Amino acid sequence: MTGRKEMKLLTAIKNKWLRKVITVLLALLFLIIIASASIFYFVFTDNLKEELTRTNLELLKHLDQKLEIMLKNIDKESIQLVQYDEVKRFFDGNMTETERSVNELHISNHIDRLIRSDEFLFSVEMYSYPHNRLVTGDNLTESMKLKNYQWIAEFELFDGYSNWLPARKLPISGANDAIYRNVVTLVRTYPLIHPPGSRKGVVAFNIKEDMLFSLIKNNTSDDQSKTMIIDRDGVVVLHPDLAQLSQDLSGLPYIAQIQRSGLQEGVLAAEVDGKKSKIFYFHAPYTNWTFVRLVPEVQLNEPLAALRSTLVWLCGIILITALVIALVVGRWTFRPIYQFVQTVSSKLNTHPQVRSSTESSLSSLIDIEARFHDIMNGSEQLHKQMKENMPIMKWQLLIELLSDYKINFSNVKPYMEMLGIQLYPNRFIVMCAELDYKTEIASTKDLHLYNYALCNVADEFMNAEGRGASVELENGTCAMIISFADDGCEAELLAAAIAELIKKYVQDHFKQTITIGIGGCVQSVRDIHLSYKQAVEALSYKLVTGRNSIITLEDIQSDPTPQFYRLVGMTDGMLDSIKLLDTEKLSTQIDRWYETFTQYNVSPEMIRQLNLQLMMKTATVADEIGIAPDELIGSGRMQDTLNQLESLEDMKFFLIGVLSDYIERIKERRSTREKSDLIERVQQFIHMHYSRNDLSLNLLADEFKVSISHLSKMFKEHTESNFIDYLMEHRVNQAKALLEQTDSKIRHIAEAVGYGNVNSFVRIFKKITALTPSEYRMMLETRIEEMHKK
């Protein structure tokens, strides 16, 4: 009895202290979890808000880039248009009325070709100040200028050479009712760089507002944000609400605050339509437009609400887990007491039930020890897996640096140290290397082995002169990031020297040749992606410079002057002549090009650069249609050949020889080319479904399970026409048959051949046949009457 009482007393003491220890442990764990969760929430909330701000501003920059690409293309077309002789005669020449009518017809043909080739372009207008005359032949009255042509008077004294006007309503001619089309207009002077007061005319390119807005509109229905564009005066250029177009919003407080700030980008808080919102804005330097994005704070706070909910659930799970662990740890802490109690109880009590209870307790503690051993083993396994995954993590980090992935640069340095990447804090240069004959390597595995060895060699040479890291890219090339500590060193020259060592080593030991493109030097890790883009661009000039070479920015730099752009614009006509296999016209164009060099006193270096760019475009076109650059005369070392030529005549004959050889190659290719079964099936589909108004390259690509770019390339290669022109010509042919065989109304015929808008149908029909549908039908009726008379 005495032994049983002592055992009960010891058990009571054990349970009392156990409860106290568990309570203290739980309280400490609870405080630690709550404090950690609170700190994490507030820190992460600040980071998340900064990330949301960066994301929205980057989105606006991305939209500006998309818009700028399209607008620059329109600007390029405007510059090219005013180079035509017919356009110059319209502005400069004194012609008779007959000559003027013929000349304006030729200009209309140029304009029609532009509109057919650019889906964004709605119309083109020209006005001559000396003759007070539009290219359509109309003389403008003052009331017409005030009503539909305000831009003519405004631009005559505009301090600049071009201007982007906000959205305006453009009347559609030929409509019975007052029908308008919203357009955004580019206005450009003639001549291109004449100051106010000495201009002879003005050209206006009207771009479809709905097509422009499709580039910036929200793509998801659950996005409550709203993006718009305003000009420097606060007038709306693009807006999701068409009623707001051309409205002056400068009176709105947040628009006024944006205009007063004078900053290129930023964010501010305001109340919009009764909702608290964040306003993100970005000023586009090319157009002087401001992108404004309105995001309700409710939408911005959705990630924070999700974070709060996640933290609440996580804290609950951790607290429950902590309770279980506290019980286990408490019992494990009192293990010596358990053993003491077991010894005392075995001596004081030999009752079978007591003995059985003690054995059960020991079994439980053994299970707990086994679980702790499992946790330790799991930790070792985790470290092992992390070590194995370090190459993948290193590859991912380098790819993110090269691709401008939105990463937190404050955390980059610790990650680099963890992954063994050693770089200096500034002066970065990216080089891109590619095996010259990678297509001849037996297997993909062998190509990876070559690139792996190339990256190792590059690391050795870069770390001998500075610090660097290499990575294999998915397209079979290798990118190398090198940094230098010495601010006084010529980083570009040193990088070129390292590239030469790498190239020579590969040639001597791998028995392979490589080409290396070298980007420019940047001062921050944030700008590494810029140097990478330059390196990729330099590497692309391999088509011209040839294999087994090192290409730097100096080899491909161009002169960004209006004179340079004008001379580059003249090369587009040469490319058109090459595609049309017109050797005689090409020779005439090259002669005129070289005369312009002499007229403007162009430097020899600039002439070589222009020739190099033209050859680059030619080689790119050749590669697209399957003609290897090696097949062209003078390929491989075009730059070296140009540098050795000492006279303009030698350069011109060399250029004509290369381009004429290309024409012969494409003639051979076209004569031996077999028609693709895919294109035949596509043509059959077009012939069967031409009446569908949704017929497009996208639809055909989905139907035949190919990419849009591949289908477009093959269609043009095998039909010598792009898809739009082919479809328009087929529809017009079908419309001709309906006009000849039926008495249907023009509107019904337009719908039957796939045009929902009768004005578009009439315009396209006239471009192809030079007659309206009504005129074509009258011509047919006249012929029939004449046949009956005979």
Image: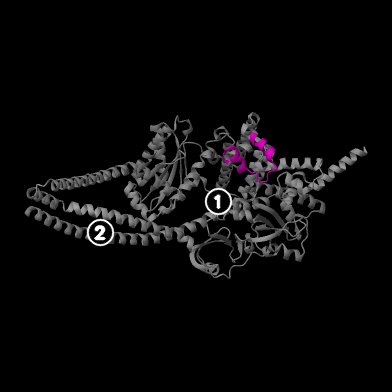
**Percent of width and height locating residue 332:** 19, 51
* Residue 320 in the figure: left or right of residue 409: left
Q: Which quadrant holds the C terminus?
A: top right
Considering the numbered disc 1 on the image, is that residue within a helix, a strand or a loop? loop
Kindly identify the residue that appears in the image at 34 percent across and 41 percent down: 460
Disc number for residue 276: none
Label 2 sits on residue? 26
Whether residue 698 sits left or right of residue 736 in the image: it is: left
Residue 392 part of the magenta-drawn span: no
Residue 27 in view in this figure: yes
What kind of residue is marked 2?
Answer: Leu
Q: For the stretch drawn in magenta, what is the main secondary structure? A: helix
What stretch of residues is rendered in magenta? 681-707
693 magenta-colored: yes
Residue 187 appears in the figure: no
User: What amino acid is at disc 1?
Assistant: Asp
SS under mark 2: helix
Q: CA distance from mark 2 to mark 1?
A: 72 Å
Residue 48: where, in percent of width, then height? 41, 59
Q: In front: 133, or 381?
A: 381
Structural crowding at the residue carrying mark 2, measured as other residues with C-alpha within 10 Å and reported as few (<14), some (14–19) or many (≥20): many
Marks 2, 1: nearer the viewer? 2
What residue does disc 1 label?
Answer: 559
**Quadrant assignment, res 167:** bottom right
